[in-house]
Amino acid sequence: MQESKRYIIIGGGISGLAAAKFIRKAEPKAKICLYESSNRLGGRCGSYYDKQLDCKLDYATHAVLKANKNAVQMWGIEKFFPACAFYHLDCKRLSANPFSHLNEIALALFNLPLKQTAPKLIYQTVALLFPFLSARKVHFSGNDTQETLISPQVQYFNEIHYNHTLREIEATNGAVKKLVFQNSALKISAQDRIILAVSPTSACRLLGLESFEFNPIINLHYRTSVALTLPKERPFLSVCGGIAQWASVKENVLSITISNAAALLKEKELPRLVWKEICTLRGVKSAFVPPCRVVKYPRATLLHTAENDNRRPSSCLTQYSNLFLAGDWTMKHLPCSIETAILSAKRAARAARKYKKR
């Protein structure tokens, strides 16, 4: 009797969820099992109810360009905002010319200033976005990522096991034979295929890879008593010349993104300093700072320097014939993003489906 084919996905972030979708579309009868270390899906994506602000927030603010075809399709995005505007705090001027703000755009794409970013990464990203027309239309997450992006992906799994952190991989003759979790172990048959879609830190520990350097991002969420507006009624803006870099608003919640934020991780006055900038661009005076939630992501993305980029895997293949890598960090010469995570999932799913036991 022939063994049934089973796909085991470790990690329920975007790449793990996308891998299940690609496998399910190609093999409707496949058995797909997910093992997630936390008690929720989505990884760095998703939404939660914040008791301090008494409202729902995204774990991080995410932007998807219309040119990001895989992310657009997975998210089911139909509405895009027009070209982004750039507000200059020093001269209180609004500009809409993206070619005059390449540094701001690069900081958003690479979480690193343009002059420090790996050249190959820049070239590859430009090639993917060319001819740039669709790259000028953007969709911002609006504190509903869990419902719009994460929850719909549950349908592609046969089993989901939460609170399962992978501790060890046991192999024989170059193939994984057992996955050891903190409280249990899973035997791997000859027909099983495994997609490891975990953080780079976890993958390096499990596979003995060289460690990476990371670059932080900080999000600030302000909740006001009335709905906010940005200049020209725009739902989001790039802020130039200050601490804040991107501001997006949905009703009475204003979300700020600060990239390349290592120097600000210990800044205690961040909510007040950023709110002062927001008041400047809105042309108003405020006697107090509204309730604010500061969320820091010390390992938000890889540090996209040439040296760090060269440490990334050249493919999804590993030292184990039946184990394949997924995750935005696995895609050399591409920025860490939702689009890249999905591209990595497509690559890993394709390789896992083609796998034949030795």
Image (cartoon, rainbow, N blue to C red):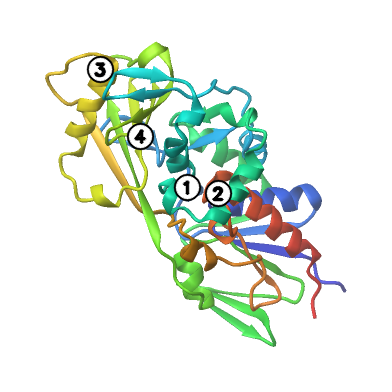
Q: CA distance from mark 1 to mark 4?
A: 13 Å
User: Mark 1 sits on what residue?
Assistant: 110
User: Which badge, 1 or 2, is on the more N-terminal residue?
Assistant: 1
The residue to which callout 2 is attached is 122
| On screen, residue 57 above or below 174 | above
Q: Earlier in the sequence, mark 1 or mark 4?
A: 1
Q: Earlier in the sequence, mark 4 or mark 2?
A: 2
Marks 1 and 2 close (CB-CB < 8 Å): yes
Query: Which sits in the foreground, 170 or 258?
Result: 258
Mark 3 lies on residue: 225
- Badge 3 local density, few (<14 within 10 Å), some, or many (20+)? few
Instruction: Residue lying at the far left in this picture: please name it.
Output: 287
Foreground mark, 1 or 2, reads 2
Image quadrant containing the C terminus: bottom right
The x and y percentages for residue 355 are 78, 69
Sequence order check, earlier mark of 3 and 1 = 1
Task: Decide: is 226 above or below 76.
Answer: above
Label 4 sits on what residue type? Gln
Query: What residue is rendered at 20% in x and 50% in y?
Result: 266
**Real-space CA distance between mark 3 and mark 2, rounded to the nearest whole angstrom:** 42 Å
